[in-house]
Image: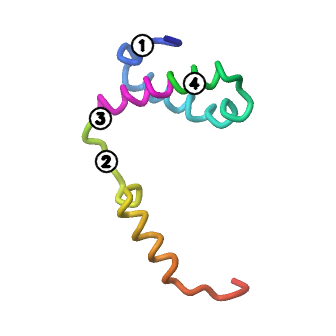
Amino acid sequence: MTGVDPSHLNDQQLMKELENIHRTRHDTLLYGSNDALRTHNERMAQLEGEYLRRNPDRLVAASRTREGARERDCADSATPTTPGT
């Protein structure tokens, strides 16, 4: 395992690690070696898994569910657009 075991991080440290790994994700995907990407994937899964374990009742925005996305898509396609605006 790379880094500190996520279960040993306090909540603030865990959030900082999650913010950092999400911030570096795009560059790792585009420019990292296969080993770097594999390591990044494993670490991200560990950190996210720990976050979910600690926050099983986290707030889930309706727009971030499949049903909410479908409603948003239907509303977008039903809204007429005015050319040039």
What residue is shown at x 71% (from left), y 26% (from top)?
Answer: 32
What residue is shown at x 69% (from left), y 33% (from top)?
Answer: 27
Task: Write down the region rendered in magenta.
Answer: 43-55
- Depth check, mark 2 against mark 1: the one in front is 1
Find disc 2 in the rendering and name its residue: 59
Marks 2 and 3, Cα distance to the nearest angstrom?
Answer: 9 Å
Q: Amino acid at mark 1?
A: Asp
- Depth check, mark 4 against mark 2: the one in front is 4
Marks 3 and 1, Cα distance to the nearest angstrom?
Answer: 17 Å
Find disc 4 in the rendering and name its residue: 40
User: SS at mark 3?
Assistant: loop
Mark number for residue 5?
1
User: SS at mark 2?
Assistant: loop
- Depth check, mark 3 against mark 4: the one in front is 4
Marks 4 and 2 close (CB-CB < 8 Å): no
| Chain-order first, disc 2 or disc 1 | 1
Q: Amino acid at mark 4?
A: His
Marks 2 and 1, Cα distance to the nearest angstrom?
Answer: 25 Å
Marks 3 and 4, Cα distance to the nearest angstrom?
Answer: 22 Å
